[in-house]
Image (tube, coloured by chain):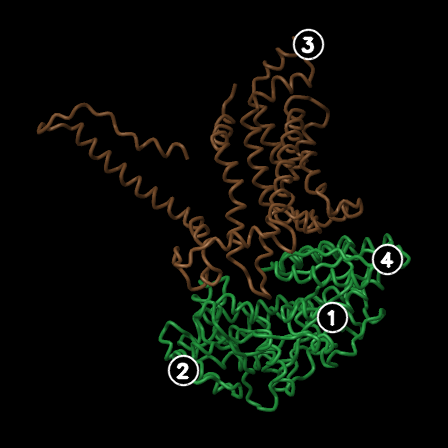
């Protein structure tokens, strides 16, 4: 995993020197245009595995054949290394022209003027859900265009439920029913199969629960929108399940790393993003997995939303704004690009691209799930506050300590709030 | 390492005189018991140390879904070479052989550069009495105290402005300029242990610094040079952060970068292929170590000797 401390340190240092450099040499280079004989070259960088590298190579080749005046140099690294490298490049003023981006880092780089305001260039966003676009915007400026979406879901393995003689859930459940379901799995699983990991330890599930209760996680000015009592109430939701078969013990979870308990066939369900499907299938070797909506005590408000699973951004210092914009437009809108990536980036965000793609098997499951929850979807939250990554990992850590029995619910809430308030003060 | 073999040698015994009380034979028995206990303990420790390696090798032959997680068995019924085939196919159109070649270029470059530059600098510090020698020596040692992370960004900016990003220059130039203070220090200490009379004699015979360095010092420093080569080879072979920051084109990536590309948190991870490639990546280092290992011990032990 990425070392947040190290990353933050690098960024802090980076911005200091970047500001210095920016002050020294404010060179305004003229926009370059290319022709088929003399193409301009832009660089595009992404994170991902060898499978994504192969797909992206195909997409780039297609773009180059359609746009002979632009050449794209692609390069890639793994997720953790990706952000170390970006932090260093941002400091040196050498960010690549176009980058694949993650929502958690959008505000950090956007506020520091490292990213190009994509509202100033021509990118077609007509085919996008209007509720999705704000997630790439900060204070009215568009820094990122979502390539694809993911939504929160409950995964389950039908084969495992069948072997225990438990009926498959239909996804219309409240928290009490969900807990009862997990307990039943735990009892019948008899120590070899558990219900799930502790869902109260998942930040986004908490965020969804807040939305179900009409509370915003963060206010407009980047402060916490909920109280300590809300958090305590949330952490108490599973207080009777911890230590039973309904929730897999934290020591077991740690033993299974780097795989998840669900991917290791130790739990029957898991609460997470729907684009983890391919990973779970590969890790567990299960024949098929299914998705249903998260529980809610208000059947009309599931608190669900589409989140950009990744975005496309451009460097503020790019010399080829026009070429960069054309490449982004192509990557998010072109139906043939959809055919190349399928759902490996998430479900295509642009309707043109989604409609132009044929989904089969696993891909279809994920797309169908997102279609089935369409009527419950509300606006995506704004890009997370600066330092959100730290808050998210702290959330996970205190929940772990809670499951180990090192902290009480009150202690866990206090610990998280202290860290959150310190962090928000630092970044204010 | 090599000393571990000594206790195995059976204690010298006379032909045993049967039925007669013989204190010597009893002490042989005691020795034998002691030696057995020692070996059992040593073997248990070795097993503990080698278990991760064994796990890695066994995992490289298992299908992805059986690696890690709830699977503890070392052997799988689904034994196959598929992981090695995937690993050798390369990533994103770049063949694995390219990654190997790149790693080799960087590692050999690092060895050559470090050995040349560190030995020359060490000669200057150990044998030439130039003004400010103490100060410069102190400054060099001080760079050892500077954490690598502090210099990442300034260094990156320098190479970025010089247009040297995405070349091997940033990764190798430091090695040719004796920037690895640790190795310079190692060699200075070694040279200080060599008798000064040798170069005084050479000077009387009319040799200059070049001659003294080339014909007297270098041959005597062989153990230190070999230790340096081994360490700089292994460090360069395993270096991840340097290549990550300075190389952009996948065709220039060395192995450590390529290894990470099989694992992706947001999609499926191919642990099998990653582990298979790790096994392959380990081989050159292992061979390098086996060939030179006796020199490591020699290098370290002779450093304590005074002329």
Q: Earlier in the sequence, mark 2 or mark 4?
A: 4
Cα separation between marks 1 and 4? 23 Å
Q: Nearer the viewer, mark 3 or mark 1?
A: 1
Corner quadrant of residue B80? bottom left
Chain where mark 3 sits:
B
Q: Earlier in the sequence, mark 1 or mark 4?
A: 4
Cα separation between marks 1 and 2? 44 Å
Q: Nearer the viewer, mark 4 or mark 3?
A: 4
Do the CB atoms of the residues marked 2 and 4 lie less than 8 Å apart?
Answer: no
Q: Nearer the viewer, mark 1 or mark 2?
A: 1
* Within-10-Å neighbours for mark 4: few <14, some 14–19, many 20+: few
Residue placed under numbered mark 4 in the picture: A36
Residue placed under numbered mark 3 in the picture: B206
- Labels 2 and 4 in the same subunit: yes
- Please give left or right for residue B59 compared with residue A55 in the image: left
Image chain in green: A
User: A10 and A424: which one is in front?
Assistant: A10
Whether residue A5 is visible to the viewer of this picture, yes or no, is no
Q: Colour of chain B?
A: brown
Residue placed under numbered mark 2 in the picture: A184
């Amino acid at each position: 995993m990425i070392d947040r401390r190290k990353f933050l340190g690098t960024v802090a240092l980076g911005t200091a020197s970047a500001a210095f450099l920016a002050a020294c040499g404010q060179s305004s280079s003229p926009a370059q245009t290319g022709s088929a004989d003399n193409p301009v070259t832009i660089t595009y960088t992404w994170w991902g595995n060898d499978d994504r590298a192969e797909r992206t190579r195909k997409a780039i080749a297609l773009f180059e054949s359609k746009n002979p005046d632009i050449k794209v140099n692609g390069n890639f690294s793994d997720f953790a290394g990706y952000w170390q490298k970006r932090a260093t490049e941002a400091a040196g003023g050498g960010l690549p022209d176009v980058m694949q981006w993650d929502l958690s880092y959008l505000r950090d780089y956007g506020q520091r003027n490292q990213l190009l305001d994509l509202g100033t260039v021509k990118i077609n966003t007509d085919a996008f859900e209007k509720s999705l676009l704000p997630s790439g915007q900060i204070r009215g400026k568009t820094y990122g265009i979502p390539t694809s979406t993911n939504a929160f879901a409950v995964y389950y393995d039908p084969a495992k439920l069948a072997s225990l003689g438990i009926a498959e859930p239909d996804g219309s459940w409240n928290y009490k029913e969900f807990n009862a379901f997990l307990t039943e799995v735990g009892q019948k699983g008899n120590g070899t199969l558990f219900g799930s990991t502790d869902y109260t330890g998942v930040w986004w599930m908490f965020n969804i629960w807040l939305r179900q209760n009409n509370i915003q996680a963060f206010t407009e000015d980047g402060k916490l929108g909920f109280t300590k009592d809300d958090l305590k109430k949330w952490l108490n939701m599973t207080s009777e399940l911890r230590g039973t078969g309904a929730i897999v013990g934290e020591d077991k979870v740690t033993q299974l790393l780097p795989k998840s308990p669900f991917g290791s066939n130790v739990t029957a369900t898991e609460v997470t993003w729907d684009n983890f499907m391919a990973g779970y299938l590969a890790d567990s070797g299960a024949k098929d997995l299914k998705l249903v909506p998260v529980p809610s005590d208000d059947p009309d408000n599931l608190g669900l939303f589409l989140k950009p699973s990744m975005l496309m951004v451009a460097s503020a210092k790019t010399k080829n704004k026009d070429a960069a914009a054309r490449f982004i437009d192509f990557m998010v809108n072109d139906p043939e690009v959809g055919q190349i990536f399928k759902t490996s980036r998430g479900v295509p965000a642009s309707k043109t691209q989604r409609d132009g793609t044929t989904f089969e098997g696993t891909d279809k499951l994920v797309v169908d799930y997102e279609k089935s929850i369409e009527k419950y979807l509300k606006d995506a939250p704004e890009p997370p506050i600066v330092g959100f990554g730290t808050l998210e990992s702290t959330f996970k850590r205190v929940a772990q300590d809670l499951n180990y029995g090192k902290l009480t619910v009150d202690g866990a809430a206090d610990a998280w709030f202290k860290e959150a308030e310190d962090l928000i003060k630092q970044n204010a | 390492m090599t000393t571990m073999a000594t206790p195995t040698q059976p204690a010298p015994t006379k032909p045993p005189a049967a039925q007669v009380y013989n204190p010597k034979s009893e002490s042989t028995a005691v020795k034998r018991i002691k030696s057995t206990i020692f070996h059992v303990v040593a073997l248990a420790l070795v097993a503990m140390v080698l278990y991760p390696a064994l796990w890695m090798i066994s995992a490289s032959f298992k299908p992805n879904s059986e690696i890690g997680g709830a699977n503890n068995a070392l052997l799988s019924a689904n034994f196959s070479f598929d992981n090695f085939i995937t690993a050798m196919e390369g990533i994103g159109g770049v063949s694995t052989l390219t990654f190997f070649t790149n790693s080799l270029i960087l590692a050999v470059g690092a060895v050559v550069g470090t050995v040349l530059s560190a030995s020359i600098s060490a000669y200057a510090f150990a044998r030439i009495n130039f003004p400010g020698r103490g100060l410069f020596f102190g400054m060099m040692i001080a760079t050892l105290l500077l954490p690598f992370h502090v210099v990442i960004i300034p260094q990156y900016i320098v190479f970025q402005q010089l247009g040297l990003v995405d070349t091997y220059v940033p990764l190798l130039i430091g090695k040719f300029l004796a920037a690895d203070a640790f190795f310079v220090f190692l060699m200075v200490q070694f040279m200080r242990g060599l008798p000064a009379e040798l170069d005084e004699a050479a000077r009387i015979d009319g040799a200059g610094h070049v001659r003294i360095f080339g014909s007297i010092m270098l041959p005597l420093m062989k153990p230190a040079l070999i230790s340096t080569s081994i360490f700089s080879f292994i460090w360069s072979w395993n270096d991840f952060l340097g290549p990550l920051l300075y190389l952009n084109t996948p065709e220039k990536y060395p192995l450590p970068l390529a290894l990470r590309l099989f694992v992706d948190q947001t999609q499926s991870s191919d642990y099998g292929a990653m582990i298979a490639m790790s096994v392959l990546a380990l081989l050159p280092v292992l061979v390098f170590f086996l060939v030179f290992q006796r020199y490591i011990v020699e290098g370290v032990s002779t450093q304590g000797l005074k002329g």
